[in-house]
Amino acid sequence: MKKTISRICQIDDWIFEVKMVRALKVRQHGEPYSAVANLTANGEQVYIDSHLSINNEELNKDDFMTIYRFCEQLGMKHISYDRIKNGIKTSKVVDIVENQYPEPNIRLVK
């Protein structure tokens, strides 16, 4: 069974929707963290706004896959981010393949 996290919940007359997340790289909450990432949700896409680490390291593959799994549990379909390398900015969009639902190809035949 796939574990999911709800982005929307209602309490009384209020509806709460997750739009921003601050992710901390740390083994246990309350301890000093080694990296922080800010994520913004818009529709079915999450944008990684920023990533900072204590050693100015870039977001590595293992850390990205942790964010990927979190976004998968939220039901998101895409993750986007910008990267600056050698002074050149590039934008990337990664599909969350587990949450892609292809449209059925149905034809009515007489």
Image (spheres, rainbow, N blue to C red):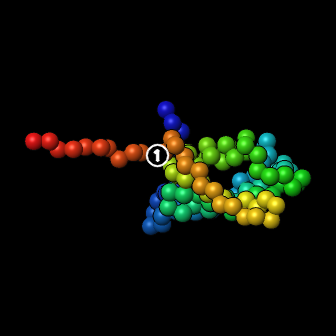
Q: Is residue 50 visible?
A: no
Residue 40: image location, x then y, percent: 62, 62
Q: Disc 1 on helix, strand or loop? A: loop
Q: Is residue 64 visible?
A: yes
Q: Amino acid at mark 1?
A: Gln
Image quadrant holding the C terminus, namely top left
Q: How many marks?
A: 1
Q: Residue furthest left?
A: 110
Residue 101: image location, x then y, percent: 41, 45
Mark 1: few/some/many CA within 10 Å (<14, 14-19, 20+):
few
Q: Residue at x 48, y 66 (%)?
A: 14
**Residue corresponding to mark 1:** 100
Q: Is residue 83 left or right of residue 11?
A: right
Q: Residue furthest top?
A: 1
Residue 59: image location, x then y, percent: 76, 50
Residue 4: image location, x then y, percent: 52, 43
Q: Is residue 60 left or right of residue 72?
A: right
Q: Give residue 13's quadrant in the image.
A: bottom left
Q: Is residue 44 left or right of residue 82?
A: left
Q: Give residue 91's quadrant in the image.
A: bottom right
Q: Residue furthest right?
A: 55
Q: Residue at x 39, y 45 (%)?
A: 102
Q: Residue at x 73, y 41 (%)?
A: 62
Q: Residue at x 76, y 64 (%)?
A: 88
